[in-house]
Amino acid sequence: MTAEPVALRAPAHRVSRRAIVYWTVRAAIGWLVLAGAEVVWLIGAGSLVPLRLVALVATGVLAVLHLMVMPQWRYRVHRWESTDQAVYTQTGWFTQERRIAPISRIQTVDSEFGVLERLFGLANVTVTTASAAGPIKVHGLDKDTASQLVAQLTSTTAATPGDAT
């Protein structure tokens, strides 16, 4: 008896649409910190004011482009799926990664959410295995979906024979 080949496909589920706004706000905070530092640098300028203005304008243009493109792009790429056999994720931006963890290899399942994520009703799920590649993370889930996923993975893992190593 030969094993049938498994077709690799994108995981079935997208993250929450609220993740788009969350990623935008999180990135905007970083850009605002950088722009604020550049404004302080500009105000304290004794010389090279035109060069510092060009740097501030360039930062503004890059920030707008990044904030318009990155969240939408991430939303289109980031996917996840959990079955009775495995947890499967697809992440990335320029470099995309697909990871599959067999249920029998799962050691822990965690959920986490920071202050900003709580404001948007989002959570992350981390599935730890014995893999040298590290844990599988599903970012940007609706908090109820994350809770259901953690409960499902916990019960499926408990019912699955294996040594999780």
Image (cartoon, rainbow, N blue to C red):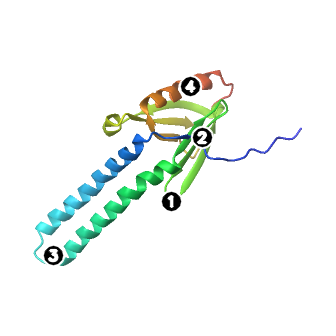
Q: CA distance from mark 3 to mark 1?
A: 35 Å
Name the amino acid type tagged 3.
Answer: Val
Q: CA distance from mark 2 to mark 4?
A: 16 Å
Going by the image, does 163 lie left or right of 137? right
Q: Nearer the viewer, mark 2 or mark 3?
A: 2
Going by the image, does 57 lie left or right of 161? left
Query: Given contact means CB atoms under 8 Å apart, are the residues at marks 2 and 4 in contact?
Result: no
Residue at the image point whose x is 24% and y is 74% from the top: 54
Position of residue 93 measured from the top left corner of the image (x, y, whole percent): 49, 55
- The residue to which callout 3 is attached is 49
What kind of element bears circle 1?
loop
What kind of element bears circle 2?
loop
Name the amino acid type tagged 4.
Answer: Gln
Residue at the image point whose x is 57% and y is 51% from the top: 97
Name the amino acid type tagged 1.
Answer: Phe
- Mark with earlier residue (3, 4): 3
Estimate how packed mark 4 is, as few (under 14), some (14 to 19) or many (20 or more) residues with alpha carbons within 10 Å: some
- Mark with earlier residue (1, 4): 1
Residue at the image point whose x is 24% and y is 55% from the top: 33
Mark carried by residue 12 = 2
- Mark with earlier residue (2, 3): 2
- Mark with earlier residue (3, 1): 3
- Mark with earlier residue (2, 4): 2
Question: Total of numbered circles in the picture?
Answer: 4
Q: Is residue 53 visible?
A: yes
Going by the image, does 55 lie left or right of 141? left
- The residue to which callout 1 is attached is 94
Query: Given contact means CB atoms under 8 Å apart, are the residues at marks 3 and 4 in contact?
Result: no
Q: CA distance from mark 1 to mark 4?
A: 31 Å
